[in-house]
Amino acid sequence: MPTTPAAPTESGSEPLDRLPGRQPAAAELAHTAARRAGDLLAPPAPVRLGDVVPAPEQVLPDPAADFTLTADTAIRVSPAGRDVAEQLAEWLRPATGFPLPIADAPLPADGPLVLTLSEAPLSEPTDRADAAGSVGVAGSVGGLGDEGYRLDVTPAGVRITAATPAGLFHGAQTVRQLFPAAIDGAAPAAERWAVPGGSIVDRPRFPYRGAMLDVARHFFPVEDVLRVVDHLARYKLNHLHLHLTDDQGWRIAVGSWPRLAEVGGATEVGGGPGGSYTQADYRRIVAYAARRHVTVVPEIDLPGHTNAALVAYPELAPGKIPPPPYIGTEVGFSYVDPADERTYAFVTDVIGEVAALTPGPWLHLGGDEAFKVKGAAYTGFVERAQRIVAATGKTVVGWHQLAPAGHADGRVLQWWGTNGDDPETAEAVRRGARLILSPGNRVYLDMKYAADTPIGHDWAGLIDVRRAYDWDPGTHLTGVPAEAVLGVEAPLWTESVTTLAEVEFMLFPRLPAVAELGWSPRSTHDWAGFRERLAGHGPRWTAAGITFHPSPDVPWPAAPTVPTQRTDDTTAETH
């Protein structure tokens, strides 16, 4: 059972009154007493415990138990939690200016800032932090699953308890949000770095929570993709779907088919230079994401959306006639020849190489808008391609157009329709498929916010932040039970999106809305409360240099900056 710790030293080492033959000097006692008195007289933390996005499952505030980070705080960590401790320190050091050194700690750990993975059943009270100025992270909690955590904040410290490093990481992201908004700045700020007191118990509703970045229509360099990974991780999204191939460009190097990247990667919408990722680039993205507990889901779109591949290798085209490069935005005109064995050699080689580069369990086959491959030709191609994916040990994901094809073990369909009544997809679920929900009129982040949004589309309707938030993935599709829903994903297609700033503008503030649908229990779903919590993130995005749309539906605490002029004479707002 927890015990009340003795008073620690400022350095976080053994309390002075426990050291043999050592009595605290009057000056030391006075300094400690003054600091504690200051804490008692300080105003409450500027952030409330319940201001977290996505909304936690359970929040129990204790206004008398705020914790304050200080310049002499150190981090002590058990080996299994060290990487999370290092990332937490990386987030906190720039704005606080505090060194936040990290040292290994045995169990039970104590010290000014403590992160540990330790056995602690959820049914028992979580131990108090063992020393003043401590943040503890402890692990293996019954009932929280692979990604849940418990957070306890007292004047003595902060403790995160989780079963896995992923749970610790999500808990650390919550701690990050509970500091003042200036914590996301790149330079030291004059703040009282307080965390509101109380406890949080939290776990995700759905295991799959993601976003898709289309790097085929417009190419985005590795650094841009890494920044998108950070945005996902900030809001506890755990999958990044990369749309790597399309008519306008092929973006991943394949050693056995080198012209795919060399030739097929040299174009993009509008005639820009395009680009592609080397296998080393792709490994870097995958590793960076994995450290942040984000799984990369690569998509090789087949049998349609293949013009770039056909330019590189005309033998894959029907009639073996090379098409011209394509830099427009129409869909449905291209396809690999489903009747030629050379096509399946190509699919086997490409899928094999991409699967070998990808440690995650998923491989996305696309399958959408192959309008010229009909009936048995289409289902026959898909069923053979599904077997090719299965032979690599990966699980097939595909757009819901795959539904008529025979079921493959574990198959996941990504539903992007706009009408919740889809009998064909519901039938595929009855045959064993699971679903990722990406309704085009709710979470397609390439849709405009409003009629005057300077970039984006409107074919699925206008999607403001409330429309992105106000729906339930568990009940959205007729005839599909909630247990068949693996999760949610917000796609961002980039026909009209050309820069990282524009990517961010389309992601924020809708990405956190989708993240809350995927993470938070349905019982917490409340637009009025969400918009208030979301408003507090505007200053965080500003501090972090994140471009966002200042939705009029959200009561932002400060006016954003005015729109700036883009070189193509359309406007994009920056903050």
Image (tube, grey):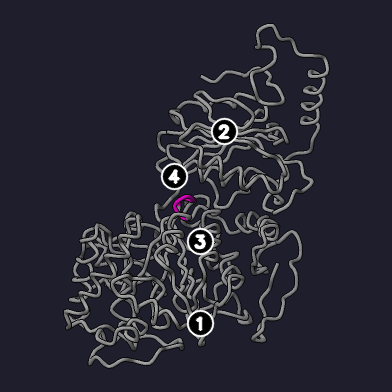
Q: Are marks 4 and 3 in contact (CB under 8 Å)?
A: no
Nearer to us of marks 1 and 3 is 1
| Residue bearing the label numbered 3 | 514
Mark carried by residue 159: 2
Image spot of residue 17 (x, y percent): 69, 12
Image spot of residue 494 (x, y percent): 50, 77
Q: Main secondary structure of the magenta part?
A: helix
Q: Earlier in the sequence, mark 1 or mark 2?
A: 2
| Residue bearing the label numbered 1 | 273
How many numbered discs sit on the rendered protein? 4
Q: Are marks 2 and 4 in contact (CB under 8 Å)?
A: no
Nearer to us of marks 4 and 1 is 1
Q: Earlier in the sequence, mark 2 or mark 4?
A: 4
Q: Quadrant of residue 405?
A: bottom left
Q: Earlier in the sequence, mark 4 or mark 3?
A: 4
Nearer to us of marks 1 and 2 is 1
The residue under the point 20% across, 75% down is 344
| Residue bearing the label numbered 4 | 147
Determine crowd level at label 4: few under 14, some 14-19, many 20+ residues with C-alpha closer than 10 A: many
Nearer to us of marks 4 and 3 is 4
Q: Are marks 3 and 2 in contact (CB under 8 Å)?
A: no
What is the secondary structure assignment of the residue under circle 3?
helix
